[in-house]
Image: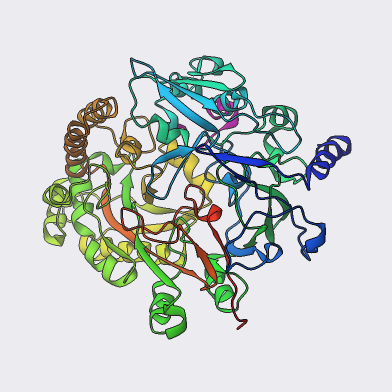
Amino acid sequence: MNREQGSRYLSRRVLLRGSVATAFALGVSRQAHPVTAAIEPPLPAATRASAPELPANALPQEQQILRTMGREGRYLDWSKSVQQRQFESALITEPLVRRNENYELVPAGAESWETSDDSLTWTFHLRPGMTWSDGQPVTAEDYAYTVRRMADPETAFDVTFYYSSIKNFTAATEGAVPVDEVGVEAIDDLTLAITTEQPTPFLGLIAADIYVVPKHVVEELGDNWSLDPATALSCGPFLLEKWDKGREVVFANNPDYNGPSAAHWQQIVYLIGADEAVFPAYENGEIDLIERGYEQIISPADQARIESDPVLSAQLHKFPQFQTWWLAFGDEGTAFSDLKVRQAFAQAVDRDAIVNSALRGQAVPAYGLLPPGFHSSNAEKQQAAAYPYDPEKARALLTEAGYGEGGQAFPHYDLTLRDPSPTVQTVAQAIQAMLKENLGVDVGIQSLERKTFTEQLNAHELPFVLIPWDMDYYDASNFMDVFVTGGRHAWSNADFDKLVQEADGIVGDEAKRAELYQQAEEILITDVGGVFLWHPVFTQLWKPYIEGSCLHENAYGILSWQAPEKGPQYYCTYFVEHESA
């Protein structure tokens, strides 16, 4: 970006400040949440535009500044990289739809949508009046461009299989067809059509993860458009105000946002810190909450101390999460191509010991892929199909496969982790010790940066990994599609693929879909596509002066402050009056 470009975008954003928009959500008019605050110190109240009405017990608008902490990402742009995205990429954009606290679709960029009679085409009608922070309108072509960009091999997007239900999306990522043949079309400025490969009842849920980018800026500046506040245009509830690498990312309320997710927060200050630094920062009053993150941030030892502290325990919130961790294996070029080897590993790892020791108080055992209570999950069938912990049987299976005493030495593999938390490292060490004791197998442990890990995993270059999957949307396809041939894992089973594909395409018969997914999951478990180990029970902390209508358990017993980019928590919470500590 040259000086002239930066000045143009920045000056336009400065001119836009102070304006007040009118928001329309679900047909209800309300005042937008205006004014971008300065970073240090906040602007005086007299310089601000008129504020949205706050609850009677709330602090003044200029004091609505939320502080949190976590790891640093590379891009504020989901459509460039999911694995390297920075918190909170969704704050400066508007997906077509959002998912509320009960995972139901609600309007966002689109105010309405419908499907064709053959269930192959979804048509989204955009909300009129959306603009980027340089004043340019948000159009259906911006959304279409976003989808095509994710499918473009040049983008090197890292979760392409997630959007594989869109017509020609996978073929485009493989270079088999040009990106302009991907099934997305701007019919006019406010109408977007998405066509799928087959009827896809969950396409609307996937559309909640189409985070629109400004085509006119990305085409001009390239992948780094989101790194500079001068060019990181927003059509969402917040603006990127500051990104001080290695220190903090600051978001400021977007005064011109006219959508349904307008927020009371004037700033969200995200401090950069390792997992180990987050709880001390909370105790010291440097941050106001600890989010769940993708991995557990609070260690089991810290959680035990929190639970014994009368003050901290009152700020503690625990809830199950629709997430599963498992061991996955390499392709035909590895020893794991032998089912008996995979079965041996499945019976040599004690999931109960992992849950009760390394993860004490923070997990429940997993016997299958679909978490308890999740769409189509059946815990009884999972347990019936799973291999029990049985070291003696495990050793016998490894011997039958030709390894160990009287056979050849088992190849050395590393158990590869993705930028792990200290707790996950502890789990990996426990697995390493179990394999040594129960099978006489030596495995190393290596950790890779998220992007490198994902690229090698997608290329099926990692023979042995410990990896999770976290719910993106409430449908079994979100988990089951991960194991379909050609996706993230090397394991391949034609019967599994057939069942999942059939279930994915059924419209209007959820009982039949569940039956097929459960049959497929039984194949996945018995053929050891993965060794499923645990489902997390997450722990969060937030200060008692944070309130909001969404801070409660949802219909599934999960707290709303549980998926930052996909829940409503940043748009419903605020600070209340309180005494200083």
The residue lying at 35 percent from left, 39 percent from top is: 478
Residue situated in front as seen by the camera: 358 or 349: 358
User: Would residue 179 be found to the left or right of residue 416 on screen?
Assistant: right
Q: Position of residue 121 (x, y in %)?
A: 41, 18
**Would you identify the image quadrant in which residue 308 lies?**
bottom left
Q: Position of residue 101 (x, y in %)?
A: 41, 50
Residue 26 included in the magenta stretch of the image: no
Q: Is residue 409 visible?
A: no
In the picture, which quadrant includes the C terminus? bottom right
The residue lying at 67 percent from left, 56 percent from top is: 249
Q: Position of residue 528 (x, y in %)?
A: 22, 44
Residue 150 included in the magenta stretch of the image: yes
Q: Magenta span covers which residues?
A: 149-160
Q: Is residue 289 visible?
A: yes
The residue lying at 43 percent from left, 56 percent from top is: 560
Q: Position of residue 37 (x, y in %)?
A: 75, 57
The residue lying at 60 percent from left, 73 percent from top is: 577
User: Would residue 308 be found to the left or right of residue 71 on screen?
Assistant: left
In the picture, which quadrant includes the N terminus? top right
Residue situated in front as seen by the camera: 323 or 25: 25
Vertical position of residue 343 compared to residue 112: above or below: below
User: Would residue 37 be found to the left or right of residue 555 on screen?
Assistant: right
**Would you identify the image quadrant in which residue 296 lies?**
bottom left
